Amino acid sequence: MSTKHYFSEAAANSLVPRALRSLVTANPHLILNEPERVVANQYHDPAKVAIISGGGSGHEPSWSGFVGEGLLSAVACGDIFASPSTKQILAAKKLAPSTKGTIFLITNYTGDRLHFGLAAEKAKAEGSGEDYLVLPATDDVSIGRSRSERVGRRGMPGHVFTMKILCAAAAEDWSFEQCVNLGRAVNDNTVSIGSSLEHCHVPGRQYQKIADDICVIGAGIHNEPGQQLVSPFPAVESVIESCLKLLCDHSDPERGFCKFAQDDETLLLVNNYGGLSNLELGALVDEVQQQLASTWSIKPVRCLSGSFETSLNAPGFSVSLCNLSASARLCDSTTATLLELFDRPTAAVSWPNLVRPSQKLVPSNKGRQNGHTNGETSVATTKQYDSMDPSLLERCIRSACEKAILAEPKLTEWDMIMGDGDCGEAVKGLCESVIRKLDEGVAAPGSVVSFLEAITDTVDDMGGTLGAIFGILLTALNNALKRQLADQGGVKDITAEIYVEALHIAVESLKTCTTAREGDRTVMDVLLPFSDEFVRTKSFEAAVVKAKERAEATRYLRPKLGRALYVGEASEQQVPDPGSWALYEILRGMAGSL
């Protein structure tokens, strides 16, 4: 597979806004908030349930290609393989308002759950009275029940079954509760498995090659190494046989997620990960259909094939099955009703059987030229809560950022082994943005509170799981500092005791948003011991020593949450958790300037 690209390595994430501009320019029923990378249906009806989705870019046509009448109301697009930020998701909600309720339909990855969950909570806090719900797609079968018990199965391309049927129901003016029950029923009866020959190549990132004599079974959509590495390279019939057994064998106690009775009506999707020719994909579809009929007595009533959720240019595919009959039984509907919803036409450009919006429809978003809209930026408070030496504040933050930037190569290397390779790049991007803020003078007032508020959007733009963790932590820290300083009446120098108490409150707040704890091989393996030591000793230096100790210890931890959970046994190596190490580098940089 070629690792060459027409766009330079430095332009990896600049591809996203350019691709979105192209999509909207060619399709006038769409509207774009370019700063927030949000695509919305210009004809969205606010009197109907809104279905909003999104995720990392690099999976096109998911999700921007599925926006339009009869499908998604709006989507938020993150950087390549990184979840969109909470701010982006709220911008999507603003372009697709609903008086009937909003369902955030996502694939089940930690960053997406955190950001969309926080967006739902912020939307509820506005007090408008609408219903909001996050509905994660959990169709993957590659990781069994015992390993996915806490985090749940990851979302795979089978989510398009849930998306199509749910969105059609919303367009038919189903109630919020009916839509929720329908979406859950279809998701609970959908299963997917992937296979690949090679990793995709992300422009600007290191590339880890899979040996020529290996085929990956259980490959994810973010370069996860997979559940099985089969060598020597098997015949294609054997590959399909292994995949279908994981999907259809309900006697498997680890993976019998969905039962298929002989009379059940099913849907089939064979999805191109982006790097297979249409000719080869067609032959794979034929083999899948033959084995489904001969081995499992399954004859799908509908078959989709093509690129629905890709992994950039990865030479691989996924197979998804949805038991439509079981879904109907679960939500007190009929198979005929669900099949009719699945067959309903849509204006979304990347769904088969495309139709255009009726000329009778009136755009709900008026006054936008060329389908574009400008984003809005938040403004930091001008109230002075605290006071400290501005040069010390700037020196401390700049040193922290510089340490993390220098660590980027090893963070990326480690994340290529145990994740999708974006951690180092994301941390570096965040730190470079914060340094630019420092150069603009955000530390000049000498206020920690003002500084934290000034970088809120910068942290939010980081995206991904780590970005969500940092965003929630810093927001909670800022709120805790303001409350404590307000209680003491007036502008004050922040003492160690105030920092300790505020950090403790912020960490406790963060723990309500994630199940990650010490021992799960996440950033919490450093954050929690650091916080505990800081509370115990009131010494920042002692807490940083503890942070280093715990960051080193993540080498020997088995992942229990996040994308690294889905890494196969054969690929596990003793490298630190990159998120944990990134936090340690930031703390080390701060300590060196105090």
Image (cartoon, rainbow, N blue to C red):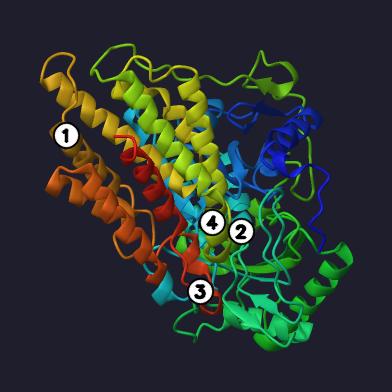
Which residue lies at the image location 50% right of the left edge and 37% below the top edge? Answer: 430
- Name the residue furthest right: 279
Which residue lies at the image location 41% right of the left edge and 22% below the top edge? Answer: 454
On the image, numbered disc 4 is attached to which residue? 410
User: Is there CB contact under 8 Å for labels 3 and 1?
Assistant: no
* Circle 1 crowding by C-alpha within 10 Å: few under 14, some 14–19, many from 20: some
* Circle 2 crowding by C-alpha within 10 Å: few under 14, some 14–19, many from 20: many
Which numbered disc covers residue 496? 1
Sequence-wise first label, 2 or 1: 2
Which residue lies at the image location 74% right of the left edge and 65% below the top edge? Answer: 303
Distance from Cα at disc 4 to Cα at disc 1: 33 Å
User: Is there CB contact under 8 Å for labels 4 and 2?
Assistant: no
Which numbered disc covers residue 572? 3
The answer to whether any part of residue 516 appears in the image is no
Sequence-wise first label, 4 or 3: 4
Which residue lies at the image location 49% right of the left edge and 87% below the top edge? Answer: 251
User: Is there CB contact under 8 Å for labels 2 and 1?
Assistant: no
- Name the residue furthest left: 488
| Total numbered circles | 4
- Residue 479 placed where, x, y %? 26, 29
Nearest to the eye among marks 2 and 1: give it: 1
Looking at the rendering, which quadrant does residue 230 occupy? bottom right
Nearest to the eye among marks 4 and 3: give it: 4
Distance from Cα at disc 2 to Cα at disc 1: 42 Å
On the image, numbered disc 2 is attached to which residue? 222
